[in-house]
Amino acid sequence: MITDEASERYRKAGRIVAHLRKLVPELVREGVKVVDICEKVEKTIVELGGKPAFPCNVGLNEIAAHYTSPFGDASRIPNGSIVKVDFGAHVDGYIADSAVTVSLNPKLSPMVQAAEEALRKALEIVRPGVRVSEVGALIQAAIERRGFRPIRNLTGHVIERYTVHTGEAIPNVGSVSGGKLKAGQVCALEPFVTFKLAKGEVKDGDRAYIFRFSRQRGAGTEEGKHLIAHIEREFRTLPFARRWLAGLDWLPNADATFAELIKSRCVSGYPVLVERSGEPVAQAEHTVLITESGYENLTA
């Protein structure tokens, strides 16, 4: 079972994320630089007493996940776009994760409403002993009832200390999974929605701007050894952005050194995920603590 101390740290992380859920819609405006949103979210997490659990994701239109601003990112929020902002905070490794979708196109607003409705419906049955397949079936039904389609290969997830995704996946479609929710688990429920005639799945893009520590051994230069030690010390197993490594005065050849770590597989990347047919995607997400009688919504 989860300890009282761990529960309180999850709750603190959740309060930080809940604050950002109110702030984020005010940040998303046509013409705003994507990097400004990422950095404002990440800075606010620190100001409120936490640390980013992963780089702030800003998914424009068909980009479903894993886009954060790289160095020199000049991209701006396009007119009439649908924007997913996915963010998480941790307190001593205890993580809360959430996402808000902002539609700047009235024609896409029903897709946002479908994602939010699916999340509400899923939360109605969350309690110990419920099969994750039941949660997925309820999410799928809620989305399809509104005339949209769930993204079948993106899921909710169990969260553990210093680990955003672990254990049983919580599907967004009906499945044959026999896994059950358990008291003491921390879980993120995360419906993704697209148009009815879309493929309803994501594919890996050819870019990666979010990374994670994989292993210490393999760096061939002293600079590489110092950098991978720094990454492990600072981020442990949590995802990080290349731009977070700016300002390391002791690493004058940072680009080449980081490329060395990728080549040697000391660091691995998360490809940007794009809806396979290029259709827009909406997302909704809360993190909950499963209790003996139901759940506590940490990010509400």
Image (tube, helix red, strand yellow):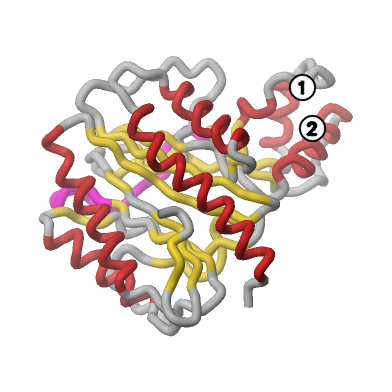
Q: Is residue 31 visible?
A: yes
* Residue under the point 30% across and 44% down: 275
Residue 205 located within the stretch drawn in magenta: yes
Which of these two is toward me, 14 or 178? Answer: 14
Determine whether, in the image, residue 275 is placed left or right of residue 183: left
The disc placed on residue 68 is none
Which mark sits nearer the N-terminus, 2 or 1? 2
Residue 244: x and y in percent read 64, 29
Going by the picture, which residue comes out furthest to the right?
Answer: 222
Residue 155: x and y in percent read 40, 59
Which of these two is toward me, 266 or 27? Answer: 27
The disc placed on residue 248 is 1
Q: Is residue 273 visible?
A: no
In the image, residue 204 above or below residue 24: below
Q: Residues within 10 Å of mark 2 (few under 14, many from 20)?
A: many
The magenta segment is 193-208
Residue 276: x and y in percent read 29, 45
Q: Are marks 2 and 1 in contact (CB under 8 Å)?
A: yes
Determine whether, in the image, residue 245 is placed left or right of residue 19: right
